[in-house]
Amino acid sequence: MKHMKVVIVEDEISASDNLRYQLNIIDPDIEVLTVLDTVKSCIAYFSKPSDATLVFMDIHLGDGLSFEIFEHVQLNIPIIFTTAYDKYALKAFTVNSIDYILKPVHQEELSKALDQFKNLTDSQFLSQTDITDVFHLLKEQQKTYKANYLIAYRDELIPVKTEDIAYFYIDTGIVKIVTLQNEMYSMDKKLEELEHELNPAQFDRVNRQFIINRNAIAKIKTYFGGKLIVNVNPPTAERIVVSKAKATSFKNWVNS
């Protein structure tokens, strides 16, 4: 393999110094071209031709997420991400055979990542579109979702934890909630509003009438025409049907 020229994108001096040190131990011939510490400086640098053959890129920089770089420049250099995000949040990377290293960076993990880089072809690295998709995924994960709802009930206001809500549903034009403890309340909101307030990892709009908590799912049955029937606890008086068009994405959500 030709002489490796590396760009380090990292806003912590100690982390970039450690990475440079580890690279030198693994292969003294690796040349670090530059260290960039902001999204802005990366955009300026990668807007011009570069001799870099590999980029080590931290995800969280001082002025934003490094994925923002790809919204401004076309970067065709393979990237190994260094990050403090957990493995679950970054499972999308492994699907595309790109590597990432969890901080703090250790020599053994770094050496494995370099070996993988040397063995991979260009087609096995994330494309610009893939990276942008992961960026939007992480931005979504950073959103703050509703943790509680204050429900008006008779002459009281009752705080209900979102995680305790089994499902939301429409009944004669009114949105109602049923808790995992089988308590029922009405609320002055639309399901469309709730979709934006609820964590999509925990709640799914399965059809026009229902948003359900994954923890409320008791059983899923196949139905005619490729549809699904979802049984929940507490049970509903109305059958919850998932359309054929949504069936696959729903099963993937439940299985994630």
Image (cartoon, helix red, strand yellow):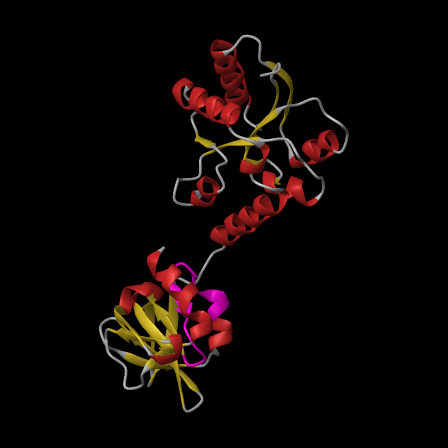
Residue at the (56%, 51%) spot, across then down: 136
Quadrant of image for the C terminus: bottom left
Q: Which residues are magenta?
A: 195-209
Residue at the (32%, 69%) spot, across then down: 160
Q: Position of residue 246 (x, y in %)?
A: 44, 70
In the picture, residue 49 is in which quadrant? Answer: top right
Observer-nearest of 117 and 27: 117
Q: Is residue 65 visible?
A: no
Q: Position of residue 57 (x, y in %)?
A: 56, 31
Residue at the (39%, 40%) spot, across then down: 87
How many marks the image carries: the answer is: 0
Q: Residue furthest right?
A: 48
Q: Is residue 221 left or right of residue 104?
A: left
Observer-nearest of 69 and 133: 133
Residue 223 drawn in magenta: no
Residue 171, compared with residue 103, is above or below; it is below
Residue 86, compared with residue 230, is above or below; it is above
Q: Position of residue 64 (x, y in %)?
A: 60, 41
Quadrant of image for the N terminus: top right
Q: Is residue 251 left or right of residue 96?
A: left
Q: Is residue 98 left or right of residue 253?
A: right
| Magenta part, dominant SS | loop
Q: Is residue 220 visible?
A: yes
Q: Position of residue 13 (x, y in %)?
A: 55, 21
